[in-house]
Amino acid sequence: MPIGDPPPASPEPPASPPRPNAFSRSRYHFTTGLPAGEAARVRDDEGNVVLTYRSFASVIGIVAALVAGIVIVAGIAGTLFLVAEGRPFAAIGAVVLCIFFTGLIAMLVPATSVTLYEGSAPALTISQRSRFSFPAATHAIATPDGRTLALVRKSVFSRLGRNRWRIVSASDGRTTGYALEESLGRALVRKVMGKFNRNLETNLALQYLGHPAGWIVRRPEGDGRADILDLSAATPAIDRRVAVGVATLVLGSEP
């Protein structure tokens, strides 16, 4: 090499592949059954943590819905009895008391608010828009900058049959999809025995814009895994951030 020539440049190291976005996966494995406030992790099929959030599972909403249902049934029965007895003013008083105590029970249920993180950065927020969770609760799924992607609504009365979470457009209030338990029979069995035997749990079918969009799997699969959001057969129309938000509500709201 001639004197004074610069040394040959060392080859540049190969560029590392870009890190996949947390919402680019097809399957998400949720950690459930944690006490409120503990860190819950969402993993992909390889076991990598893609999202984290603070567990918000609580029995308060379930107990409140049960007690409110008892109050309503007792109020209706009492009102009908008083009307039959020819005591209209007492019947009106029974209705007022029923409404008052039902509202009071609803006020005691804390509003849901949870943030999902990708690493240390916020990736998605889920917050309760409705003041009360009775008779129905509305949650907003939004980006960290506050842009609402969709609203998710659920009536407390759906607990009496098939649980149904309704996905609503944030712009025009139009229903765009559902997360619905697979059958009424399985839903009723789950309410009685599902907490004692995971094989009696129900899965929820995701539908979006009239097309199948995936499954929220609560019943253990052949490999024993459960609590999975499976979007492998999803149509391109669904925003996976919305699907993850719905799955977080479904799998994270019950202890």
Image (cartoon, helix red, strand yellow):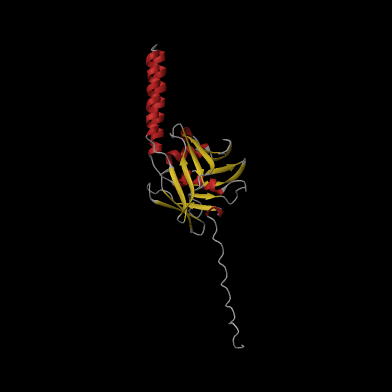
Percent across and percent down for residue 193 are 43, 41
**Rendered position, 232 above or below 127:** below
Residue at x 39%, y 23% (from the top left corner): 75
Residue at x 38%, y 50% (from the top left corner): 38
Q: Is 4 in front, or is 168? A: 4
Percent across and percent down for residue 195 are 42, 43
Percent across and percent down for residue 97 are 37, 23
Pick the quarter of the image with the N terminus.
bottom right
Pick the quarter of the image with the C terminus.
top left
| Residue 180 can be seen, yes or no | no
Q: How many marks?
A: 0
**Rendered position, 252 above or below 85:** below
Q: Is 218 in front, or is 214? A: 214
Quadrant of the rendered structure where residue 7 is? bottom right
Q: Is 75 in front, or is 100? A: 100
Q: Is 252 in front, or is 121? A: 121
| Residue 139 can be seen, yes or no | yes
Quadrant of the rendered structure where residue 98 is? top left
Residue at x 45%, y 48% (from the top left corner): 115
Give the residue furthest to the top: 86
**Rendered position, 66 above or below 48:** above
Tell me: 18 left or right of 159.
right
Quadrant of the rendered structure where residue 63 is? top left
Percent across and percent down for residue 18 are 56, 62
Tell me: 108 left or right of 120.
left
